[in-house]
Amino acid sequence: MEPFKKIRKIHFVGIGGAGMIGIARVLLQKGYKVSGSDLSISSDLLKLKKEGATVFKGHAGENVINKDLVVLSSAINKNNPELINATKLGVTVIPRAEMLGSIMRGYDSIAIAGSHGKTTTTSMLAKIFSEANLSPTYVVGGKVLSSDLNSDLGSGKYLIAEADESDGSFIHLHPNAAVVTNIDDDHLVHYENKFEKLLDAFITFLDNVPFFGYIVINNDDKNIKKISKRISRKQIKFGFSKSSDFQIQQGDYSKGFQNFSIFDNYKNKKYTFSISSPGKHNIYNAAAAAVLSIEEGIPINTIKKGLKNFSGVGRRYEKHNLNINGSDTLLIDDYGHHPIEVLSNLNAVKQEFPSKRVCVIFQPHRFSRTAQLFDEFLNVLKKTKALVMLDIYPASEKPIKGINSDAIVQSLKQMGHKNCHLVKNHQDVNNFIEKNYLNFDIFITQGAGSIAGVCDLITDKWKK
């Protein structure tokens, strides 16, 4: 990337977000003076501070004085004092995705989009390209467990980045190649609760790929099929469907690894792969990463090695070994917060631990999502044997009458769920566990909000 003209001091409003901190780190590594603010200072921000960034706790207008550029998180509202002062001072303000799009210039860039699985797929690609000694720059929305980072500045020609559709900002990206894992009815608030507007945004994003580029798409996804004929770029299709260019065949789960194969219909060849992550959704993620890697000319053995050695992403089926009063117990922490994601995680646990007793601790994310998908959540959560519900994480939204976790609990009880509880205080989750741990082999913390802190409370008390 050529240096931005006369831009040296860059300030991030809401720097603690997963997408923001990754971009900030790459710019810091490139030699820019990076500062940022957030309501709380996480361990990740403390790490960024040690790397040379200036980090402010809380938002204040003076934080943007003498800055050349302000980058705004989509979570920041128009009344933020830093945004107001930046506008007053005449400092250019851009959204996070526009900054990412600017960084992409000069690289062979790859962007991974989709309602589910994009963080894992992006991280898998970063691992494969690293195994191929291509030294990629990558920016993902979660921690790559092997590096404990969500971004890194490589020395190679590739930049691999997660493309976020939640606020529509991914239309600012113009990657050389793109992946779409799936499209689902999530984040519809930004799209005026109109699914067609979300589909239109994906079409715009994919048509941003240049004429010499290509897109890798899930041929089994009904919503991707709806838009595929409206996209004017070269399409490479993967999936279990026979009409796929790269057809997946699921194998067995053995000795901690899930095995699957891909038949390459272009070359009439079959490739076999192994991944340590259970669940059919992870086969899709790995297949997407493998197909794009094949298209980029990476040797099959290197792709196999990269996928097999991939150790996962933070808060995506992340395991913690616990010892509760002398009893060995497993905690699985997962970010999934859409019904499909929750079900995928439950199925993955069942695949790896078919006979284990499982208790799910779930925190719904956003009132709007819970209202929109209320019945879908019930249909998934009724499959749990034991469930602890936390209050809905609002994510800055105002409550919606009748939409709360107690309503979910009462509905599940009416459906016949016999072991369903509402816990108001996060501290009380540990009390529940201490009283009931002998009844379970596995606890799952599930959700995208403050439940990450609940996982920390549990591990702080009982981690081996």
Image: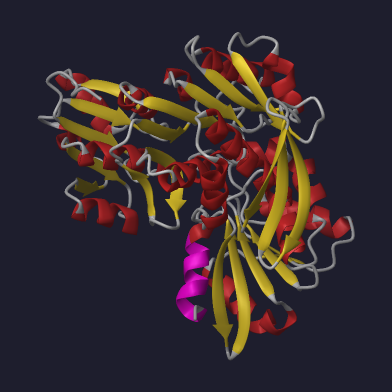
Nearer-the-camera pick, 8 or 398: 8
Residue 308 screen position, x and y as percent: 57, 55
Answer above or below: position of 203 versus 340: above
- The answer to which image quadrant residue 140 occupies is top left
Q: Residue 455 lies in magenta, yes or no? A: yes
- Magenta segment, principal secondary structure? helix
- Residue shown at the point (62%, 47%) measured from the top left: 337
- Left or right, 61 with reference to 338: left
Q: Residue furthest front?
A: 268
- The answer to which image quadrant residue 62 occupies is top left
Nearer-the-camera pick, 40 or 244: 244
Residue 355 screen position, x and y as percent: 80, 72
Nearer-the-camera pick, 194 or 271: 271
- Left or right, 237 with reference to 9: right
- Residue shown at the point (50%, 53%) measured from the top left: 313
Magenta-colored span: 453-462
Residue 453 screen position, x and y as percent: 47, 62
- Residue shown at the point (29%, 36%) measured from the top left: 13
- Left or right, 67 with reference to 367: left
Answer above or below: position of 249 versus 405: above
Residue 403 visible (yes or no) = no
Answer above or below: position of 33 versus 147: above
Nearer-the-camera pick, 144 or 369: 144
Q: Which quadrant holds the N terminus?
A: top left
- The answer to which image quadrant residue 351 occupies is bottom right
Residue 285 visible (yes or no) = yes
Residue 248 screen position, x and y as percent: 74, 39
Q: Residue 19 lies in magenta, yes or no? A: no
- Residue shown at the point (66%, 32%) measured from the top left: 182
